[in-house]
């Protein structure tokens, strides 16, 4: 809140010196202070100049009532001492526009049926204030010099993990030279975001962020940042709050919410309130492969300068087995030697026929030129070539060598953007792509959709929508995956005959311990 630095100093002085009566209206107090309060309310989205037939005094009083309601103050419509004191507190620089309405929306969600929840999700999607994907990359561009880099990176990682623990989102840190969906940057003063967003040093607005899909959060470099609760401004809480904005969350008026306009204090309770969790799940769903969201108390994040992310009491014990066994994966395929390739994030695993699994390897190390993550993959059992799909682009490799000089624009051939899964279907000797409730059969070479396609997934009786992978099996069956479940399709009948949990029931997926004859986790 940089433009009102003088307002803050004068208001604090009046409060400290007792020159301002706690209940005295601004009209009978300091007129200049009222003008500054009006500028504050306008900056943060409370003062509506477009209300017809309303006097300036009425608009100001209504704006104060809205601000007082969001701030959990007595709603009087008067610029009194408690309201003035609230305005002087350091806070997030993002406007509170829509907080009142958004909170009512989430309150109604507690009592709404499935149809109402589906309509609400569609409305959120239409607003464009969400990411179209579940895997997001981030980059820490710079950080305050007086803080150790390792501690700041640990705080950033933990802040992103807070949101992934309770939603269907996953995050990974992008390399310094590559693109990133979300960028965290520290600035001084005016940094081309407009004068109202310029930073003014300690106090005022500490940070601000932009909704998807700009994906940026800015922090005041001159603030007295700390990673300890014993001094300074706790950077971890501000990071977690601003990351919430980059995911599409507005401010919350719920008591003790992390997304409240004024930053939360670390304590014994969980860092995310029920309102924070409900808001992010409205946009991105619940945690993939887990029915219960994992919450951590705020006291675990009180001192990052002494916090070791690899050995924390608040950290869950490491589970055995590959990472994909415990959650889900992005894509899966199989080659002519029945060797599996399982992709998750920026890594992949090879699983031999006997279920022995390799260490995770960087995706771009094996197939140079691929993006950091992929949507779908398939190996042609005709020539052994790998096909990868991401967004509207396609890649083809023979082993590790690209067949095409560069990626191809798949949509020219009618292929869907962001396919859910890819499959080489032996009876047709063709690649098939799955997207939502439809499937696409491709011509030889994989870049054109055959005539009369796409068709409804109802042709494959019992196969669910939005699968994450599909494989042909040696016995002629086809197996489909989604989250932690699988469906086995009889190829002759084109009908699902079996379903279950792949990690615990399919030893050849690499999640089975042959010695103990049980799952690895």
Image (cartoon, grey):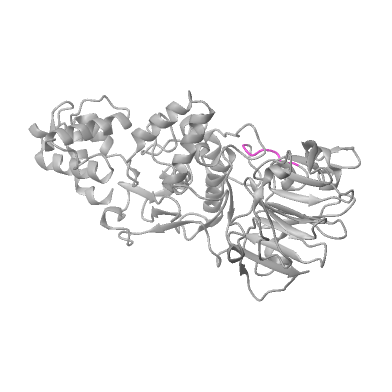
Q: Looking at the image, how many numbered discs can be counted on the residues? A: 0
Quadrant, the C terminus: top right
Residue 229 visible in the picture: no
The one nearer the camera, 96 or 217, is 96
Closer to the camera, 229 or 501?
A: 501
Range drawn in magenta? 314-319
* 164 relative to 353 in the view: left or right: left
Judged left or right of residue 455, residue 246 is left
In front: 199, or 384?
A: 384
* Residue 383 appears in view: yes
Q: Residue furthest left?
A: 28
The dominant secondary structure in magenta is loop
Position of 189 compared to 228: left or right? left
Within the magenta stretch, is there residue 318?
yes
User: Which residue appears farthest toward the bottom when viewing the image?
Assistant: 405
Q: Residue at x 85, y 50 (%)?
A: 473
Identify the residue at horizontal 54%, vertical 51% (top origin): 151
Q: Position of residue 159 (x, y in %)?
A: 52, 45
Name the image quarter holding residue 56. top left
Residue 193 pos. (x, y %): 32, 58
Instruction: Please check the rendered image and state whether residue 212 is part of the magenta-colored stretch, yes or no.
Output: no
Give the answer, above or below, for where 327 lies relative to 178: above
Q: Is residue 278 above or below residue 126?
A: above
Question: Which percent across, then down, holds residue 5?
Answer: 23, 48
- Of residues 236 and 510, the one nearer the viewer is 510
């Amino acid at each position: 809140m940089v433009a009102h630095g003088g307002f803050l100093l004068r208001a604090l002085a009046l409060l400290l010196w007792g020159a301002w009566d706690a209940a005295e209206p601004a009209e009978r107090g300091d007129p200049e202070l009222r003008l500054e309060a009006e500028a504050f309310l306008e900056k943060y989205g409370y003062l509506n100049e477009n209300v017809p037939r309303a006097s300036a005094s009425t608009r100001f009083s209504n704006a104060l009532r809205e601000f007082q309601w969001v701030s959990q103050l007595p709603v009087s419509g008067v610029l009194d001492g408690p309201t003035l004191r609230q305005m002087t507190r350091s806070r997030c620089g993002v406007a509170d526009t829509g907080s009142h309405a958004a909170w009512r929306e989430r309150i109604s969600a507690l009592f709404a049926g499935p149809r109402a929840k589906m309509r609400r999700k569609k409305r959120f999607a239409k607003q464009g204030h969400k990411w179209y994907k579940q895997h997001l990359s981030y980059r820490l561009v710079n950080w305050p010099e007086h803080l150790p880099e390792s501690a700041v990176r640990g705080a950033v990682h933990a802040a992103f993990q807070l949101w992934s623990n309770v939603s269907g989102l996953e995050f990974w840190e992008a390399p310094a030279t590559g693109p990133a969906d979300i960028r965290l940057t520290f600035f001084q003063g005016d940094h081309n975001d407009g004068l109202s967003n310029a930073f003014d040093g300690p106090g005022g607005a500490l940070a601000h962020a932009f909704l998807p899909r700009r994906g940026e959060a800015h922090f005041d470099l001159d603030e007295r940042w700390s990673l300890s609760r014993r001094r300074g401004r706790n950077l971890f809480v501000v990071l977690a709050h601003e990351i919430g904005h980059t995911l599409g969350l507005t401010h919350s008026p719920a008591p003790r919410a992390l997304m409240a306009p004024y930053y939360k204090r670390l304590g014994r309770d969980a860092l995310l309130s029920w309102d924070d969790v409900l808001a992010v799940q409205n946009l991105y769903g619940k945690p993939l492969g887990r029915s219960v969201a994992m919450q951590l108390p705020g006291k675990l994040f009180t001192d990052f300068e002494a916090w070791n992310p690899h050995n924390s009491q608040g950290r869950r014990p490491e589970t055995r087995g590959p990472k994909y066994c415990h959650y889900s994966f992005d894509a899966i395929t199989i080659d002519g030697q029945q060797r599996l390739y399982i992709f998750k994030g920026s890594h992949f695993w090879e699983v031999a026929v006997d279920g022995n699994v390799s260490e995770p390897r960087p995706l771009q190390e094996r197939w140079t030129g691929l993006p950091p993550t992929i949507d779908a993959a398939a190996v042609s059992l005709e020539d052994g070539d790998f096909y990868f799909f991401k967004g509207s682009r396609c890649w083809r490799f023979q082993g590790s060598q690209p067949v095409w000089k560069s990626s191809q624009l798949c949509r020219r051939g009618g292929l869907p953007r962001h396919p859910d899964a890819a499959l080489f279907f032996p009876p047709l000797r063709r690649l098939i792509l799955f997207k939502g409730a439809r499937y696409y059969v491709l011509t030889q070479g994989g870049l054109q959709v055959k005539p009369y396609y796409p068709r409804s997934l109802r042709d494959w009786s019992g196969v669910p929508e939005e699968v994450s992978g599909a494989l042909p099996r040696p016995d002629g069956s086809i197996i489909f995956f989604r989250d932690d479940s699988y469906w086995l399709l009889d190829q002759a009948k084109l009908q699902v005959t079996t379903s279950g949990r792949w990690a615990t029931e399919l030893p050849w997926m690499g999640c089975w311990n042959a010695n103990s004859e049980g799952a690895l986790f």
